[in-house]
């Protein structure tokens, strides 16, 4: 697994755990960094902190484009994947949009239900179409 793929998986793990346990994302991330076993990649830190800084806007976007579902009704792991991916899509200019979506879909295939990959792809595609101007 490539370094950025591992970092994304680790970011999803932190976001998921914080959500499920009702923990502060940054505090939990800090604990994982301090523990250092396994080491937390810089890209993981960037993704978790980036989501945390933009959480309200990201959750609004997911809520708007998650057809038929509110953010609170999404499966916990899907919500974590979408949060990480929306941050990376809209704020991480060094990663191509297609790579972000592909990685999120792969995480959904690995971590969630059979329906999740297509759903994650659809939500991210809708957000990308609505939020990123075309040249």
Image: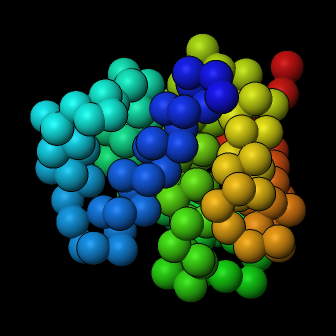
* Most foreground residue, 31 or 129: 31
Residue 48 drawn at (x, y percent):
37, 41
Residue 126 drawn at (x, y percent):
79, 54
In this view, 36 is above or below 17: above
Query: 39 left or right of 3?
Result: left
* Most foreground residue, 94 or 41: 41
Residue drawn at point x = 22 percent, y = 31 percent? 36
In this view, 96 is above or below 88: above
Image quarter in which the C terminus is found: top right
Quarter holding residue 117? bottom right
Q: Is residue 126 visible?
A: no
In this view, 88 is above or below 122: above
Residue drawn at point x = 38 percent, y = 25 percent? 41
How many labels were placed on the picture?
0
Quarter holding residue 99? top right
Residue drawn at point x = 71 percent, y = 39 percent? 103
Residue 128 drawn at (x, y percent):
75, 43
* Most foreground residue, 41 or 91: 41
* Most foreground residue, 87 or 13: 13
Image quarter in which the N terminus is found: top right
- The colouring scheme, among rainbow, by chain, secondary structure or one colour, is rainbow
Looking at the image, the residue that sits furthest to the front is 37
Query: 102 left or right of 42?
Result: right
Query: 18 left or right of 27?
Result: right
Residue drawn at point x = 45 percent, y = 42 percent? 10
Q: Is residue 23 visible?
A: yes
């Amino acid at each position: 697994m490539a370094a950025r793929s591992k970092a994304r998986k680790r970011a999803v793990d932190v976001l998921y755990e914080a959500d499920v346990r009702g923990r502060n994302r940054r505090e939990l991330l800090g604990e994982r960094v301090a523990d250092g076993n396994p080491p937390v990649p810089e890209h993981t830190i960037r993704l978790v902190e980036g989501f945390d800084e933009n959480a309200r806007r990201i959750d609004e976007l997911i809520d708007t484009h998650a057809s038929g579902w509110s953010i609170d009704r999404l499966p916990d792991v899907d919500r974590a994947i979408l949060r990480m991916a929306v941050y990376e899509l809209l704020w991480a200019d060094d990663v191509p949009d297609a790579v972000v979506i592909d990685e999120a879909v792969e995480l959904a295939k690995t971590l969630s239900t059979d329906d999740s990959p297509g759903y994650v792809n659809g939500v991210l595609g809708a957000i990308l179409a609505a939020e990123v101007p075309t040249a």
